[in-house]
Amino acid sequence: MVVFITGGSSGIGRRLVLHYLGRGCTVATVARREANLADLYQSLECVRGLLRTYCADITDKKTIAKTIAAVEQELGPIDLAIVNAGTTYQQLEPNLDLECFEEVMLTNAIGSTYTLVPLVETMLKRGRGQIVGISSLAASGSIPRMSTYCASKAALNYLLEGLYWTLKPHGISVTTICPGFIETEMTVKHQIPSHWCMTLDRAIAEIVRAIEQKPRLYCFPFWQYQFVRLLGIMPDRIKEHVFNYSIEKWFPRPTLRSKKHDARKIIQSP
Ligand SMILES: NC(=O)c1ccc[n+]([C@@H]2O[C@H](COP(=O)([O-])OP(=O)(O)OC[C@H]3O[C@@H](n4cnc5c(N)ncnc54)[C@H](OP(=O)(O)O)[C@@H]3O)[C@@H](O)[C@H]2O)c1
């Protein structure tokens, strides 16, 4: 089985790469940080599958299309594609930071679409395949400080939901996975309190189970999902109180504000 995963250089993506290699799959992954991809090879004892890494940026339309074509040529048809690469930022000022907005939308919504287009095309030709998008509970409703991230993941959810209905009759399954907070570089960088985060082990177990069961939408953990749903039906008056009194507790202000990802420099065509 050939598995294609975007964002294998850290966090969820890296762990999914190791999981599928351990199962004997052939795995291809794409990310920008060459050093992290090289480091992935160091942790490859005890795995049975074959790994190929591609240093590429998903926001570069031509490069990601070429990468997917190269994966299929070198490893064979992609059976499972996990569109996982993503980024976030906390908006600490009332003003929208356009540069951050562009980067988050370009990565999470547009870059994911650049990845999906060639995948859908090649899977449609074969009449089979599985696509999984790693979205977020943030797609369920917008909250202060996270509005750009919420908007980008909501766009991804809507795109994937439409694709689910469109591609189902063609033999292609599409699953949207919406996790709550997980202990990864992303939550560490934004100093999300650890008591809000589930362990990466637990998240990977949930994600792998959802990939096997192929539902249209899978949201976890249960209580964070219920809380997000409750926020969605709460009258605005009450919601305003919740946000006014709780937002600083939920998301304490990070001491350092990091805007751009250092790794942007490492962009290479396959
Ligand atoms: N952690 C959470 O609490 C949480 C919760 C819900 C959903 N998610 C979602 O889960 C996914 C994975 O996040 P994570 O928590 O594992 O964070 P992470 O450790 O920061 O991983 C993000 C991955 O995406 C890759 N990436 C980002 N921009 C890219 C680009 N332009 N081109 C290619 N690769 C790119 C990064 O690789 P390079 O930097 O090397 O390019 C990295 O491998 C994201 O979509 C995120 O929104 C995370």
Image (tube, rainbow, N blue to C red):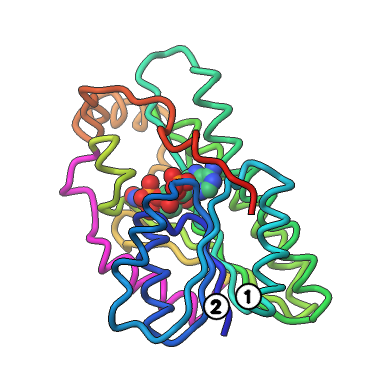
User: What amino acid is labelled 1 in the image?
Assistant: Gln
Mark 1: which secondary structure? strand
Q: What stretch is highlighted in magenta?
A: 192-215
Whether residue 230 appears in this view of the structure is no
**Given the current orientation, which residue lies at the most extreme right position?**
125
Question: Where's residue 4, x and y in %?
Answer: 56, 68
Say which residue label 2 marks. 214
Residue 94: x %, y % from top left:
42, 13
Q: Is the residue indicated by label 2 positioned so its CB lies within 8 Å of ligand 1?
A: no
Task: Name the amino acid type tagged 2.
Answer: Lys
Residue 46 in the image: state x and y as whole percent: 29, 83
Q: Is the magenta stretch mostly helix, strand or loop?
A: helix
Residue 168, picture quadrant: bottom right
Q: Is residue 205 above or below residue 64?
A: below
The residue lying toward the viewer, choosing from 177 and 16, is 16
Q: Above or below — where is 187 with respect to 104?
A: below
* Residue 27 image offset from top left, x and y in percent: 51, 74
Which residue lies at the image location 72% right of the left edge and 62% below the top edge? 163
Disc 1 from disc 2: Cα separation: 8 Å
Image check: 62 left or right of 136? right
Q: Are marks 1 and 2 in contact (CB under 8 Å)?
A: yes
Residue behind mark 1: 130
Q: Residue at x 44, y 38 (%)?
A: 263
Q: Is residue 215 visible?
A: yes
Q: Does the magenta stretch include residue 179?
A: no
Q: Nearer the viewer, mark 1 or mark 2?
A: 1
